[in-house]
Amino acid sequence: MTRQETIPFFAPDLFEDDRAFLLDLVRRTGTDPGQKFILGERTAAFEEALRETLGAAHTVACSSGTSALTLILTAMGIGPGDEVVVPAYGCAPLGNTVANLGATPVFADIDPVTMVIDPDRAEEAVGPRTKALMPAHMFSVMADMPRLRQLAARHGLRLVEDSAVAQGGVLDGRPAGTWGEAGVFSFVQVKTFGMAGEGGAVVTDDAELARVVRALRNHGQEGQRFVHQRVGCNSRFDELLAAFQLHRLPGLPARLERRARIADYYTERFTPLTGHGIVPPPPGRNGRCHYVYSLLADERDALQAHLAAAGIVSHVYYPQPLPHQPAFARFAPPGRTWPHALSASRRQLAIPINPHLTDAETEHIADTVCAFATHRPAV
């Protein structure tokens, strides 16, 4: 493979097979006599289809995964004076959604290999003002939800599952998004069920929570238009994209299986490299979601440069732990450290795993990583 034949991280042709359908859908939606562009029959049908795939009682489509977290926390009454335990390593919404409600995110360190929240560190972070626990699935690994459920029950905490990256993941026979009192999904393009736009969903078995979330997403309206029972926001779902997701839903299992096969191959190739400073995710498929395949590399920057020289685009996610970010500095108590989160921020590197990768491209990526590692002395 020449340097010019770059393997992108995100597939630029992700929706190429759906082009004709999408273009026709835009025309049909725009010329529909009902002129219903948000929260119509297509959104309701998409919510029902998604609910059925999960075996959940309720799904509520909304404008993004971040918005879904905010809607849940708001519906739970989280606000000033409350604390929410969140991972110290991950995406900004873990802190933003809590802080924007006037509550305090309390950061707990992560597992040094899987990079998900460590239940023991999470329990240490629980205090008298803690109202909720919000673990997040990371990259290709689901958090230890059985232990986190026990932790939440032991301390009387609300359990919010940030499953934004994990659609299709299954842990001990239970789908991601259904372990907490409520879970979320994100449908932004790069996620496992991404779409040509922005969107998300709340998943819950709690009928009252679902009712409040539905009202909150539509300016606090319940039933009658322009009658607002509560203060809400605009987090509505697009009818065009609801129809697009319904169209793509039957193909999701095959796309997930392709991601899983690539991950299996990578892990088989990379597990022997641990002595050379490269650590892959743990093997197996239980509790895996394959949104992003992340390595931990002692010489992360050198590996990234090596991959780039071979025409392979890689990504560094979260170059700082959340409590090290300026936005969350006020929530980082003096003297407190998160060593595993800091280590992950210095060592994490994601390589392509999108379902449009060919076998040859997958082999080339694995060969390139292995060549980098084996030309360095074993530790």
Image: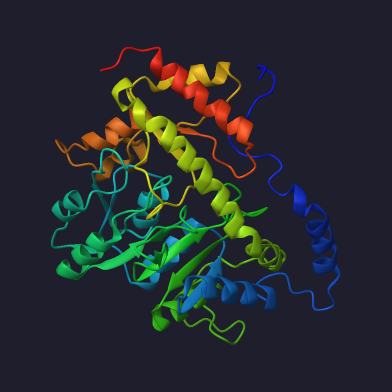
- Left or right: 215 with respect to 42? left
Of 135 and 114, the residue lying toward us: 114
Q: Residue at x 44, y 17 (%)?
A: 372
Q: Outermost residue toward the bottom?
A: 224
Give percent across and percent down for residue 249: 63, 64
How many numbered tags mark residues here? 0
Above or below for 323 versus 369? below
Residue 365 image position (x, y, % from top left) = 54, 28
Residue 253 location (% of width, % of height): 58, 59
For residue 208, which quarter of the picture? Answer: bottom left
Q: Quadrant of the C terminus?
A: top left
Quadrant housing residue 20: bottom right
Q: Residue at x 61, y 36 (%)?
A: 359
Q: Tell me the residue at 48%/83% (across/down).
A: 229
Residue 67 rendering spot, x and y as whole percentages? 49, 60
Relative vertical location of residue 146 with respect to residue 366 in this rendering, above or below: below
Q: Can the viewer see residue 313 in this picture?
A: no
> Is 36 left or right of 297, judged from the image as shown?
right
Q: Is residue 264 among the parts visible in the rendering?
A: yes
Q: How is colour applied across the structure in the image?
A: rainbow
Which quarter shows the N terminus? top right
Q: Relative to the observer, which residue lies in front, 335 or 375?
A: 375
Residue under the image location 28 percent in, 31 percent down: 343
